Image (cartoon, rainbow, N blue to C red):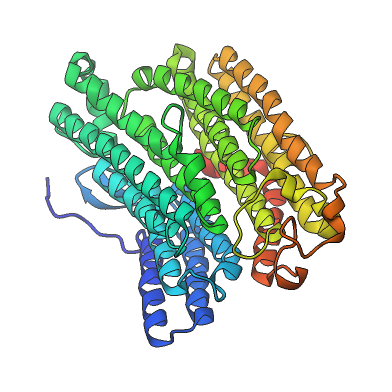
Amino acid sequence: MSLVQSVDNVALLPAYLAAGTAVLVLLADLLVARRGATVAVAAAGAVATAAGAVLVGAGETRRTFCVGADCSWVLDGRAALVAAVFALLTLGVLGLSGPLLRGGPTPPGEFCFLLACSMTGGVVLGAAGDLITLIVALETLTLPLYVLVGLRRGSLASAEAAVTFFVVSVVATTLTLLGAALLYAVTGGLHLDRLGAILNDRPELLDLPLATAAVALVVLGLAFKVAAVPFHAWAPATYDGAPLPVAAYLSTASKLGGVVALLAVVQRALPADVTGPVLALLAVLTMTVGNLVALRQRRTVRLLAWSSVAQAGYILAPLGALALAAGRTDEARAEAYAAAVAYAVFFVLLELAAFAALVALRPAGADGGTVDDLRGSARRQPWVAAALALALIGLAGLPPGLAGLFAKVTVVRSLLTGGAGWLALVVAVNAVIGLAYYLRLAATLYAGDARDVRSGEEGGAPAAGGRVAWTVTTALALATALAVVVGCAPQLVLDLAAR
């Protein structure tokens, strides 16, 4: 067997484009030193990365950095979908950050560079074929976020959120690395497919306490990244302390990265009969605790943070069906994996639209405020309020928010196919609980309030002069349009997720 790794530069094109974007942003900030040019370079790089991922992913699966049959880079349809979503998320967050970067305390060069670095980690994460590449990509995605959360100079809440996020993420990474090291000690392999083959051919290895500890540490370490209960406490405080565009990126890209990493090890490396019961328990706890605590929230970002915790439970639910023999058939497993990826994509689009509308409704540079601060917003900005209401209804899983409706139907269908009817019932009950706070927030937008006549006060005026920045409007329009299009053609996402 040759020890020389083959390199397919076409397969690496999305990663080249993402990493090149970060370098070009640094050069633009150094040589031109103009906010508009720096942001334009970052936006162009995000568009190029998405286009490159789509072009390469449209063909056959491409593999590189291979030793024999084991490859560290596998770019298939799902990896291309993940790369394109990360690039589009970066583009959307850049749009939302226009008011924050315009004369504010946040330096544009550092902001765009860190965002591009995080995008690079997300692009690599989807194609990772071994545990080392997977963990390095996940940390490349996460590390810039520590700084982005605390980049707002002079804000104590931002600094506290950054420290909380950093400490918890370091613990999570330590657990994952320790689990990977123990897996290597037990099996002698690090490539995901090889690990899966070894554990499948030699099931007696799973009887070793070292193997049990390794599997548990990897799964629990990645559960931190997804903000699954009981590893969720960092999320609400971090989201609420971060600038709104960064909170939008945290609640979408960070969660998507955790889901992709967890799905990779569950699908390809770790035995389903071991991980299935753990994931089923995590899914039930996560969706139930997230929904119940969200009912009591009065701050808007904290409400969205707890709702994203609940949404993580819905994403993990299809993987919980692997706990049953009926859920481990080839058909049931394929449907469960596709459902988890598809739900994550649907959630990311709707969550980004919700945060984009919130940025448009709040004063430039302000935090998310309270739910009461949004009272009567539909009278001042009817189209923005309608977009937020549509995103909230979609997250609740009701029409006309078809993306959210099809997402929950996809999850329930995969659970029924896997014989996990009880888990499907838990999902349905939690979806009903979620209606209470999603519809309450949507109704608040259309409720009357005495402050409506004072459009310039802190309760609801967006930016100076009552006008929303065009970049925010564009990002909101695109996110809403994508959510509507995906809701009308959900099978397209399912087909890509199943590849």
- Residue 104 lies, in percent from the top left, at 54, 71
The image quadrant where one finds the N terminus is top left
Visible residue check, residue 225: yes
Along the line of sight, which residue is nearer the eye, 408 or 475?
475
Tell me what residue is drawn at x 59 percent, y 13 percent. 421
Tell me what residue is drawn at x 21 percent, y 22 percent. 211
Tell me what residue is drawn at x 50 percent, y 53 percent. 242
Visible residue check, residue 75: no
Q: Is residue 207 left or right of residue 149?
A: left
- Residue 301 lies, in percent from the top left, at 60, 46
Q: Is residue 78 above or below residue 414?
A: below
Q: Is residue 398 left or right of residue 366?
A: right
Q: Is residue 70 left or right of residue 262?
A: left
Toward which corner of the image does residue 473 lie, by quadrant?
Answer: bottom right
- Residue 372 lies, in percent from the top left, at 74, 45
- Residue 471 lies, in percent from the top left, at 64, 69
Toward which corner of the image does residue 287 lie, by quadrant?
Answer: top right
Q: Is residue 464 above or below residue 429?
A: below
Along the line of sight, which residue is nearer the eye, 280 or 369?
369
Tell me what residue is drawn at x 56 percent, y 65 percent. 97
